Image (spheres, rainbow, N blue to C red):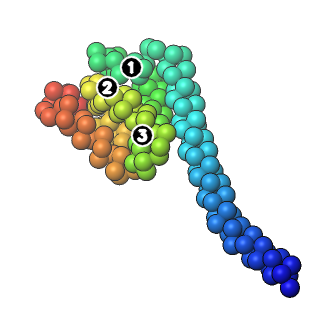
Amino acid sequence: MIESISMTFISELATALSLPLAVLVLWQSHVSTRRAQEYGTYDVLDEKYQDFLLLCFENLELGVYGAEPDFNEKSLGSDQAQQREILLLILISILERAYLMYRRRSKPMEKQWNGWNSYIDAYCASPSFARAWLGGLGVEFESEFVSFIERKINLKWPDLSALDVS
């Protein structure tokens, strides 16, 4: 009888201990999967940014890299102006993705947001970027991101006439 009670007790004890252990393993698996997805998304964003930098390097005459404050986009031919607009759209798309990741409070992006935010500030401070944005580049993006960029441009350029948007 003692042997059967012991086996029953051991069986019930094993069952009782396995449930919390299974929940813990499942939770850890979920956390690991989520972290891998966040880092994967961060890696994709990083790759897109590197691709953008290469495009800028190949097209330095378009004045997109570094938000050149003195760049005069009016000196570009129509093909170059179109190429510049496409590069700016690629940049804005990358910045939008960074913004959306930050808004979700993704752990990897919380640490990176200060750099992205500074980069966005530099572009919004560039007259040529602000003119391009105000000329309609931002209309197709996520509305909160558009508002975010417009607030930054308005902070830097409270007097929009100084931008000579035409």
Left or right? Give the position of 2 relative to 122: right
Per the image, the residue denoted by label 1 is 66
Residue 79 % position (x, y) = 47, 24
Measured Cα–Cα span from mark 3 to mark 2: 19 Å
Measured Cα–Cα span from mark 2 to mark 1: 8 Å
Lower position in the chain sequence, tag 3 or tag 1: 1
The residue that appears at 47% across and 46% down in the rendered structure is: 106
Choose top left, top right, bottom left or bottom right for residue 63: top left
Evaluate whether residue 97 shows in this view.
no
Characterize the local packing of mark 3: few (<14), some (14-19) or many (20 or more) Cα atoms within 10 angstroms.
few
Residue 104 % position (x, y) = 43, 50
Count of numbered circles in the view: 3
Nearest to the eye among marks 3 and 2: give it: 3
* Secondary structure at numbered mark 2: helix
Residue 105 tag number: none
Choose top left, top right, bottom left or bottom right for residue 77: top left
The residue that appears at 43% across and 35% down in the rendered structure is: 111
Q: Pick the residue in front: 162 or 6.
A: 6
Per the image, the residue denoted by label 3 is 110
Lower position in the chain sequence, tag 3 or tag 2: 3
Measured Cα–Cα span from mark 3 to mark 1: 23 Å
Choose top left, top right, bottom left or bottom right for residue 69: top left
Residue 122 tag number: 2
